[in-house]
Amino acid sequence: MPNYDLTPEQDMLRKTIRDFAEKEIKPVRQQLDEKEEFSTDLTHQMGELGLFGMTVSPDYGGQGMDTLSYVICVEELARVDACQAATVAAENSLGIGPIYNYGNEEQKRKYLPDLCSGKSLWGFGLTEADAGSDAGNSKTRAELKNGKWVINGSKIFITNSATKITAGVTVQAITGEKGDGKKAISCIIVEQGTPGFTAKEMHKKMTWRSSNTGELYFDNVTVPESNLLGKRGGGFQQMLATLDSGRLGIGAMGLGGAQGAFEAALEYSKQRKAFGQPISKFQVNAFKLADCAMEIEAARNLLYKACWLKDQERPFGKEAAMAKLYCSEVFHRVANHSVQLHGGYGLMEEYPAAKFYRDQKLLEIGEGTSEIQRIVISRYLGL
């Protein structure tokens, strides 16, 4: 029989992150959300807890943990606040991941220790105004001139890219053509402060208001040829593999957010009375909560299995896409029920239901839309 128990270390990790989220994040989440303020202080605290570089080898300052432990941490953060969970998930998968997986020894030694400690952050410049789901339609270009890359173009919706502690970004750019005439896409490291490179913080977002989102501009940005990450022309494959792992983090955000929205609804339904009894006693509401609990349990099993496959070094791409898709859409349904069960109060920002409802939507869009996930899954089915 399979053993579904977490290890004692994973149980302790969950408790530690839950305690931190309840004590340090929960009291300030609403204020940060209203002010659209990224918290450097919370980021440093999360770094001290070891939440960055979680699956990176200790040789480079990482924690050397398994994928499931990392996902549990993101899940527990998202149970309280999607924004802080987004900082951690994006940094581990999109910021640190490409450097760790494709960087040379010099690049790893130079950048990873500070990134894994939470001293600094890193962005992954992929999305453009006309290149979201169609990532291959990127227009940003990098030309090799006299031993240096000259980069021109722009990126948008890049997490962790425009904070006071952002050390740089990995930018995906066209670097020529392949033998078959298709674009050769490469990933190049650009440090903050490089002349011609501008990172502008985006505001007035519906969702993830205290997570940092940036617009990036490259105006003849010149960096050494050695800033190439991995092989020239290998950027598209690097991106696809990075997104496979990143989907597990997004799945964890969906799972944790669904758990938080469910718990808020359950607590409120037991307190709110109508017609002389708690509204949880009405079958129509009890069934909503029962469905939420069932779907969350199913989502957790699907996500944890995908993590297990990755930790066993077995193919996990299909399961990662399924977990990302299912967890994000379960969160959608649970957040919707949570607002409904809160009634009019569910529309008020002073109650957590409204924030869960807003924060959910990005999970059906970021790191591959729900439609793209269905394409990915269908291709694994040979369709």
Image (tube, helix red, strand yellow):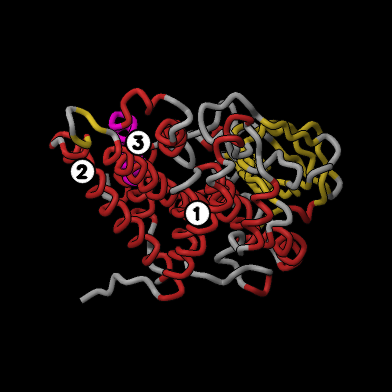
- For mark 2, give the secondary structure: helix
Residue 94 falls left or right of residue 103? left
Of the numbered discs 1 and 2, the one sitting upstream in the chain is 1
Toward the front, the furthest residue is 276
Q: CA distance from mark 3 to mark 1?
A: 30 Å
Q: What residue would you read off at disc 3?
A: 335
Q: What residue would you read off at disc 2?
A: 291
Residues 213 and 286: in front is 286
| Relative vertical location of residue 291 with respect to residue 201 in this rendering, above or below | below
Of the numbered discs 3 and 1, the one sitting upstream in the chain is 1
Q: Quadrant of residue 289?
A: top left
Whether the residues at callouts 3 and 1 have beta carbons within 8 Å, the answer is no
Around disc 3, counting alpha carbons within 10 Å, would you say few (fewer than 14), some (14 to 19), or many (20 or more)? many
Q: Position of residue 270 (x, y in %)?
A: 27, 41
- Residue type, mark 1 in image: Ala
Tell me, for residue 20, which label it has, or none.
none
Closer to us: mark 3 or mark 1? 3
